Image (cartoon, grey):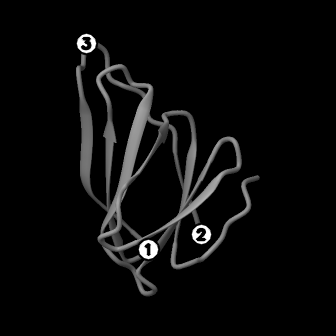
Amino acid sequence: PDALQLRPVLPPNATHFALRGIEYMGAVLSLVLDGSGTKMTVAMTSGGSSGKMTLTDSSGKTSVLAKGASAWTGAAQRVTVTVGKDSLSDS
């Protein structure tokens, strides 16, 4: 309940995939998969209570974004999103 885990898969025959307006813990997120389905971009378009979003990828690398900051782009494997925390350990 305190984290959102993303494991996106490009739909069959799709050349691009985007979900915008994902509401989670007071924040609004967008998710975009590139045409090959190998990269995803996550951005916070509206902030939660702290205005911060933490992303942890499957390798354990953690990035913190603030509302309006550049979007995170990485491998489309698994990303854990937490809103309102400065850090998160990948489990």
Q: CA distance from mark 1 to mark 2?
A: 8 Å
Q: Which residue is tagged 2?
A: 2
The image position of residue 39, as x and y in percent, is 42, 32
Secondary structure state at the residue bearing disc 2 = loop
Image position, residue 31 (x, y; %): 33, 47
Secondary structure state at the residue bearing disc 1: loop
- In the image, what residue type sits under mark 3? Asn
Which mark sits nearer the N-terminus, 2 or 3?
2
Label 3: element kind: loop
* 27 up-or-down from 51: above or below: above
Q: Does the residue at mark 1 contact the one at mark 2 (Cβ under 8 Å)?
A: no
Numbered disc total:
3
Q: What x and y, as percent, mark residue 28?
A: 31, 67
Q: Nearer the viewer, residue 44 or 64?
A: 64
Asked if residue 58 lies left or right of residue 20, the reply is right
Distance, label 2 to label 3, CA atoms, is: 34 Å
Residue at 39% in and 24% down: 37
Residue found 36% across the figure and 25% down from its top: 10
Q: Which residue is mark 3?
A: 13
- Mark 3 or 1, nearer chain start: 3
Question: In which quadrant is the N terminus drawn?
Answer: bottom right
Placement of 74 over or under 2, stated as above or below: above
Kind of residue sitting beneath label 1:
Met
* Amino acid on which the number 2 mark rests in the picture: Asp
Residue receiving disc 1: 25
Q: Residue at x 32, y 22 (%)?
A: 11
